[in-house]
C-alpha cells in the first residue's frame, strides 16, 4: 500500500483565497483524521470521520474551515477565505479504529505545508 | 489543561541510551500511555504504548512508574535517525469504553549528536 497520500505537498496562497487540501486514506481504513501543526500549538486534531461521516469537528477553528469525505478513498479540507494565521502543516491520518495503537494505529500522510501571505 | 508535561528539548550522544521523561500526574485508571514520534517533514509514527506494566518492542522500551504518574521512553542505542520530536499521549482507547479527542501537544525535540 502506498500509505496515506496528501496533495499538494506545498501550497502558497494569498489572503482571502480559497484553499483545498486533499487526502487519500489507506484502503480499508474506516477512520480519517485531519490535524493541523504549528510551532505554538503543536499537533491539533481538527476533525475525524468514520465511514465517511464526520464524527467530531469540535477542533475546527471556525466557519472558514470545512471538511468533506464524499467516499471512502477521498477527503478534502477547505479553507475559505484563507488568512495568514492559517499557515501551518496540515496532516491527514487514517486507521481501522479511533485509537492509537495495534489495529487502531493512526498512519499519517506526509502533510501539506500551507503558507498564506 | 495539558494532560502531559514533557521537556521541550533534549540531547543524546549517538550510541547511548536516550531517556525521554513524561509527567502525567492526573492520569486516570483506564488511560493508557502512548508514544509517537515525528521525524522532520514527516507525519507522526507510533512507537509504543502501555497501561501499567513496562513494555518493550523492537523500537523502544516504556517504563511506567508504579503510581502511573510518570513514564520514560527509552531508546537503548540512539542513532542519528532517531532525531525527532517525541510525543507522550494519555488516552483511553475506544475499546476500553472511552471517547477522547487525541491531543499530541508539542512533545520533546530529541537531538542525537554524533
Image (cartoon, rainbow, N blue to C red):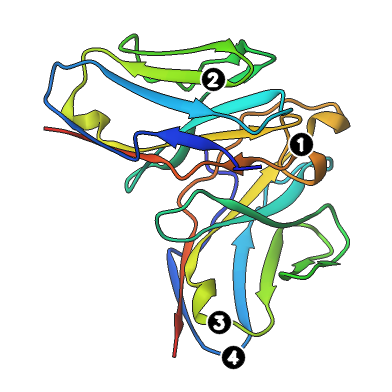
Q: Is residue B12 above or below residue A21?
A: below
Q: Looking at the image, is mark 1 or mark 4 earlier in the sequence?
A: 4
Q: Where is residue A26 drawn, in percent x and y?
A: 64, 33
Q: CA distance from mark 4 to mark 2?
A: 42 Å
Look at mark 2 in the image and give the residue it sits on: A74
Give me the chain letter of mark 1.
Answer: B
Looking at the image, residue A20 lies above or below residue B103: above
Numbered circle sitting on residue B15: 4
* Crowd class of label 1 (few under 14; some 14 to 19; many from 20; radius 10 Å): many
Alpha carbon distance from label 2 to label 3: 37 Å
CB-based contact (under 8 Å), mark 1 and mark 4:
no
Q: Which chain's residue wears label 2?
A: A
Residue drawn 70% across the image and 52% down it: B34
Q: Are marks 2 and 3 on the same chain?
A: no
Foreground pick, B70 / B14: B14
Q: Do the dots labelled 1 and 2 sit on one chain?
A: no
Inter-mark Cα distance, 1 to 4: 34 Å
Residue A69 on image: x %, y %? 54, 13
What separation in Å lies between label 1 and label 2 (alpha carbons)? 28 Å
Q: Which mark, by number, is residue B92?
A: 1
- From the image, which quarter does the C terminus of chain A lie in? top left
**Do dots 4 and 2 share one subunit?**
no
Q: Quadrant of residue B113?
A: bottom left
- The part of the image, by quadrant, that contains residue A7 is top left
The answer to whether marks 3 and 4 mark residues whose Cβ atoms lie closer than 8 Å is yes
Kind of element beneath mark 3: loop
Q: Secondary structure at mark 1?
A: loop
Residue named by callout 3: B79
Amino acid at each position: 500500500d502506498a500509505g496515506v497520500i496528501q496533495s499538494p505537498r506545498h501550497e502558497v496562497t494569498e489572503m482571502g483565497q480559497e484553499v483545498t487540501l486533499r487526502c487519500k486514506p489507506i484502503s480499508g481504513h474506516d477512520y480519517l483524521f485531519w490535524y493541523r501543526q504549528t510551532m505554538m500549538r503543536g499537533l491539533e486534531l481538527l476533525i475525524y470521520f468514520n465511514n465517511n461521516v464526520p464524527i467530531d469537528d469540535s477542533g475546527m477553528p471556525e466557519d472558514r474551515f470545512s471538511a468533506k469525505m464524499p467516499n471512502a478513498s477521498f477527503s478534502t479540507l477547505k479553507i475559505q477565505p484563507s488568512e495568514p494565521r492559517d499557515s501551518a502543516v496540515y496532516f491527514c491520518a487514517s486507521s481501522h479504529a479511533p485509537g492509537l495503537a495495534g489495529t487502531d494505529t493512526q498512519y499519517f500522510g506526509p502533510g501539506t505545508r500551507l503558507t498564506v501571505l | 489543561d495539558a494532560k502531559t508535561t514533557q521537556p521541550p528539548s533534549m540531547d543524546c550522544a549517538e550510541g547511548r541510551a536516550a531517556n525521554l521523561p513524561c509527567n502525567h500526574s492526573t492520569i486516570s485508571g483506564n488511560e493508557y500511555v502512548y508514544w509517537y514520534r515525528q521525524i522532520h517533514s514527516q507525519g507522526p509514527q507510533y512507537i509504543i504504548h502501555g497501561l501499567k506494566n513496562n513494555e518493550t518492542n523492537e523500537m523502544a522500551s516504556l517504563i511506567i512508574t508504579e503510581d502511573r504518574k510518570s513514564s520514560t521512553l527509552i531508546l537503548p542505542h540512539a542513532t542519528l535517525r532517531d532525531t525527532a520530536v517525541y510525543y507522550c499521549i494519555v488516552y483511553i482507547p475506544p475499546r476500553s469504553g472511552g471517547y477522547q479527542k487525541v491531543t499530541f501537544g508539542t512533545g520533546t525535540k530529541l537531538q542525537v549528536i554524533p
